[in-house]
Amino acid sequence: MPGRCPVEGSAGVSGLSAPLRNLRESLGPPGSPWQKELITLGPGESAWQVVLKKIQELSNSDHQDPFMVADLGMLASRHRAFCQALPRVSPFYAVKCNSSPWILRVLAALGTGFDCASQVELEQVLGLGVAPSRIIYANPCKPSSHLRFAAHHGVQLLTFDSEEELTKVAQHHPRARLVLRLWTQDSQSSFPLSAKFGARLEVCGHLLTFAKDLGLAVVGASFHVGSDCQTPQTYTQAIADCQRVFEMGRRAGHDMSLLDIGGGFPGAEGSGPKFEELARVINAALAQDFPEESGIEVIAEPGRFYVQSVCTAAVNIIAKKAVLEPGGGRKLKYYLSDGHYGSFRLFLREPVRKMPIVVKEFCSELPLFPCTLYGPTCDAFDRFYLEEVWLPELDVGDWLIFPSMGTYASSMTSSFNGFLPAAISYAMDPELRSLLETVP
Ligand SMILES: *Cc1c(COP(=O)(O)O)cnc(C)c1O
């Protein structure tokens, strides 16, 4: 198991530490395909400027495909922020949130663990040379063949929340180190999960005995408060519930040593509590229910917090219709090069509408028109917002930029109707890049 979260205050821009060699190796020989996706930022240059430069380049070419820019320096600084605010908690990054290869590579080099939910995610992370002990297979309902894959590759930490899953684990992965996933009150989260996963406290005693009778080792408890959690008290309650499960587990003869506080940490400062505030509440709950002296190892599975602000998406207006209303009003329909079946799958479910930034030469702020934004496919459901939004008059060829598109965007794309997922470029600051290139 990994130790505490490594925090380097001194290591320059990205806080990158020892396993640079891994990253260096994954850079490959000069000119390898991966390298083409990497952009080294010039002195003082930001990822935002890279987005604008690419728009300029594409506008002068005859391809205006949608694209994303990922800011890897930002990723490293999110890791630092997490570790500083929650010093007792080792992050196991949730791969499903954004599984782009360079995101995973940089996190592996920074020393995070990983939360995987399927065989392919396990393969992806193991393929980076990450030790199986740095992985938790945190999907409580797993296909048997994926369980056998985990067993075969030494991935031992698994979550469960039912008798049926325990029966499967006993058959396919009897040496697993199991973590009991608890139900939480997550109605205040933007994306609740508890209808689908989590055992109620009342049934935990039975599940722990059932596991013991099957000869299985339960080593801890976990929960997920729902993605984008707005109520710190949810963590307090869930941590207190875990403490009770630890007692039940010990009574059933299990060696309880691992607490997993899941994900759910908001990815951006919004209307809800700040991350530091959330962290203070979590640290207090840990001190209360799992004091340092207990020696309990604490991990988390952050997804959104790490990557939301890392990626910026740029989409092009590929078609437009102006509609004159009977009363003389003017409405506009814009058809964009990316949409619901690409990077914007979650857009309609976002609690707060995320508005784009308009890129247009000589764009006047006014007047604004009621506009409908559609994606490029032939499905009418492929749209950005349920209602109209107010935007200035734009033309075919103009661009819209959507910041904070790092979560559940590129990892949920499809090629429906023949529209390919947006290509991702990765921006690295020069300090990080030169560090990589001077590692022997
Ligand atoms: C999705 C998921 C996460 C990540 O959640 P975020 O809200 O993005 O932090 C962590 N753990 C599990 C089990 C998940 O399903």
Image (cartoon, rainbow, N blue to C red):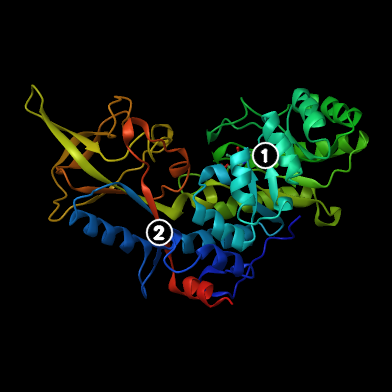
Circle 2: residue type: Glu
Q: Which mark is residue 54?
A: none
User: In the displayed structure, does residue 292 sit left or right of residue 134?
Assistant: right
Task: Check disc 1: other Cα within 10 Å, few if <14, some if 14-19, many if 20+.
Answer: many
Kindly tell me whether mark 1's CB lies below 8 Å from ligand 1.
yes
Could you tell me if the residues under marks 1 and 2 are in contact, i.e. CB atoms within 8 Å? no
| Picture residue at 67% right of the left edge, 31% below the top | 142
Mark 1 sits on what residue?
138
Name the image quarter holding the C terminus: bottom right
Residue drawn at x 69%, y 42% is 236
Residue visible at 72% across and 47% down? 285
* Up-down relation of residue 381 to residue 337 (above or below): above
Q: Whole-Å distance between the Cαs marked 1 and 2? A: 30 Å
- From the viewer's perspective, tell me whether residue 436 is left or right of residue 125: left
Label 2 Cα neighbours within 10 Å, binned few <14 / some 14-19 / many ≥20: some
Query: Residue under circle 2?
Result: 37
Residue 158: image location, x then y, percent:
73, 39
Task: Name the side, left or right, on which 428 lies relative to 256.
Answer: left
Front-most of residues 233 and 407 = 407
Q: Position of residue 21 (x, y in %)?
A: 60, 69
**In the image, ligand 1 is in what quadrant?**
top right
Q: Where residue 173 sits in the image (x, y, percent)?
A: 79, 36
Q: How many marks on residues?
A: 2
